[in-house]
Image (cartoon, helix red, strand yellow):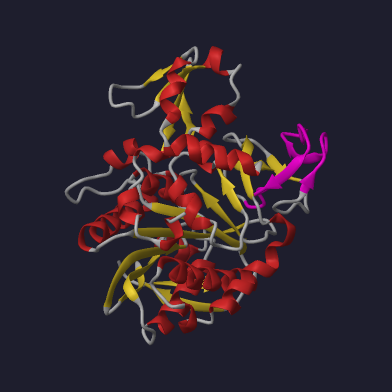
Amino acid sequence: MTKVKVHSKALDSTIEVDRIIGHVKGHKKGPTLVFMGGIHGNEPAGVFALKWVFERLQAKKVSGSIYGIAGNLWALKKGERYHKEDLNRLWTKDLLASLPQNGDPAIHHDQAEQIEINNLLSKILKDEEGPFYFFDMHTTSSETLPFLTVNDSLLNRHFTTQYPLPIILGIEEYLNGPILSYINELGYVAFGFEAGQHDDMASIENCVAFIYLSLVYCGSLEKESCEYQHYHDILAKTTGDVRHIYEIYYRYGVNENEDFKMIPGFYNFQRIRRNQQLARSNGNTINAQDDGRIFMPLYQSKGVDGFFMIKKIWSPFLVISEFFRKYRLDRLLIYLPGVKWIDKDRSGLIVNKQIARFLAKDIFHLFGYRHIYADRNHYKMFNREANARYADYEDQPWLKP
């Protein structure tokens, strides 16, 4: 695709980028890292950070292969989140299987972007050597501290706890079709980094710090080569008392043609009181159902996620959960009433809704199961551990006990 111009309000600057912002091949064998920025066109911070880092990586001794990829080029050029459909909601098996073949035209710009990105990722996975790591950099419409969004697999957990950042688990239960969920289903380490507010200068600085820390944690770059402590401190100083592992337990979804507006002033991780007014919908008040912390309140024109609520995960729960998954004790779940395997390959669970309402979701989360979607009478739950490529990462220092 032809290069496009991308503008940053924070820098009051414009750059030109292609699909591949940068690619560095090290002289030594090592992992393959894929960084993506701008999958939403109104989030240019990751694109500017990748451009800046790759201009300096050429002079450093790196191991393995490192890619920087621009997401929705059409939307980045326009400064809009997307054209017709959110590019970060199109990565389901059904939608991927229905992509035009043999040069047939895409139905809109977002699908055309998806086809190019999918072909590029497939080529990288075919041509490069593992272990593979995928990072998707975002910004938010509300004020926020930087944090990580992580699909709940043990590989992801072990790797992401290296960062001095809050970790949010369970977002895959509430979002259908993010690119990182698709990559996780292939078994690779893949997670998201939220750097800050869209047009805040600090968001670009946080993305740069995140990229360098990731290079070090993957073994692509030595700490001494990149001012590691400086970049570590940039992220660490922002997180303070919220540097924990959290779980999403509620999402307010915005319906088509709904007149939804957040009450001004909310920011990520802010403590919320029960019955506190959060938003208005079609003239009616939306209040908090209980105490908690608000997460990703919607302050932009496009989007269907009004806000989320999160809670801190009890540390012993994480330890118990790892034990259950390590020894595949999920086989015991089918002895619960209303629970059975989806197929003979035990690729997931079918859970009767009438029975499931008496079973806490936390029980299934312990074993690694997340509710992905539901039909009228059943939940379908899938386990990230089933496809995890542990053998690819077994020699990595971050995975060793």
Residue beneath the point at 40% across and 70% down: 219
Closest to the observer, 150 or 259 = 150
Q: Is residue 21 visible?
A: yes
Considering only vertical position in the picture, is 348 above or below 310?
A: above
Closest to the observer, 297 or 340 = 340
Closest to the observer, 198 or 181 = 181
Residue beneath the point at 58% across and 77% down: 229
In the rendering, at what x and y percent does residue 87 appear? 43, 50
Left or right: 182, with 293 as reference point = left
Residue beneath the point at 60% across and 42% down: 305
Considering only vertical position in the picture, is 328 above or below 357?
A: below
Q: Which residues are magenta?
A: 271-300
The single residue placed furthest to the front in the displayed view is 401
Considering only vertical position in the picture, is 119 above or below 377?
A: below
Q: Is residue 379 magenta?
A: no
In the rendering, at what x and y percent does residue 192 appear? 50, 55
In the rendering, at what x and y percent does residue 118 appear? 30, 53
In the rendering, at what x and y percent does residue 297 appear? 67, 48
Closest to the observer, 341 or 23 = 341
The single residue placed furthest to the left in the displayed view is 102
Q: Is residue 287 magenta?
A: yes
Q: Is residue 98 visible?
A: no
Which quarter of the rendered picture does the N terminus lie within?
Answer: bottom left
